[in-house]
Amino acid sequence: LIRARQPGFDVDKIPLDDLCRAAKEIGLESVELVEVKDFPTLRKHGLICAMVTGVPGMIPSGLNRVENHDRIVSWMERTIPAAADAGAPNIICFSGNRDGMSDEQGLENCVTGLKRIVPAAEKRGITICMELLNSKRTHKDYMGDHTSWGIELVNRVGSERFKLLYDIFHMQIMEGDLIDTIRDIMKQGDQAY
């Protein structure tokens, strides 16, 4: 990858300043999944953040719960302008865990929350990306765990500024046969980041 680094594993144990210095030295342009508070460090090294993180609730407590909407929307309203000003084009969000909720109810709730967020994203040219994750191994009970659910969410939200972060590691675990799945996505239009 030339544009980004993937957090996790031992790389998160490296001080951000050191990571940015090394990233720049090897030609990277972005350090992904950092928060707005980290933008000055990235800027100091001539880097951007291609995918901003920090959304309240993170993976387990997301937009599928109406009770989470106000705090997530408030965070997005502060983060979208900061991301735009810093040249960070995308902000990650999550469906949240099922915790007994039906996929259809969670889908409806996510649409409701996202429709509160996308006008600000559209105004500032920021793309909100919901990551699809596996619920089989690493993110037990995560709702956004199938391509079809994610594509339906994109269609219902209906904004060019809302897309899926389609992680093939996670979708291969859940669905297999990624080549045909990706071909199907491509036939439907530009819906994945």
Image (cartoon, rainbow, N blue to C red):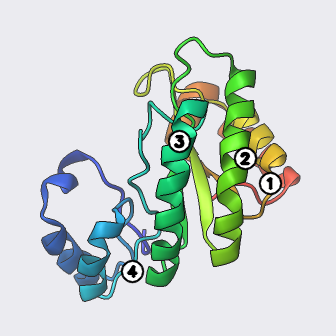
Q: Earlier in the sequence, mark 3 or mark 2?
A: 3
Hey, what amino acid is under mark 1? Answer: Met
- Which of 152/7 is in front? 152
**Residue visible at 32% across and 88% down in the picture:** 46
- Disc 4 designates what residue? 29
Hey, what amino acid is under mark 4? Answer: Glu
Residue 75, image x, y percentages:
47, 56
Q: Residues within 10 Å of mark 2 (few under 14, many from 20)?
A: some
Tell me the element at label 4. loop
Q: Nearer the viewer, mark 4 or mark 2?
A: 4
**Residue visible at 44% across and 30% down in the picture:** 60
Q: Is residue 22 left or right of residue 59?
A: left
CB-based contact (under 8 Å), mark 3 and mark 2:
no
Is residue 45 visible from the viewing direction of this image? no
- Disc 3 designates what residue? 94
- Disc 1 designates what residue? 186
Residue 191, image x, y percentages:
74, 55
Placement of 165 over or under 49, stated as above or below: above
- Give the spatial CA distance, label 3 vs label 2: 21 Å
Q: Residues within 10 Å of mark 3 (few under 14, many from 20)?
A: many
Hey, what amino acid is under mark 2? Answer: Ile
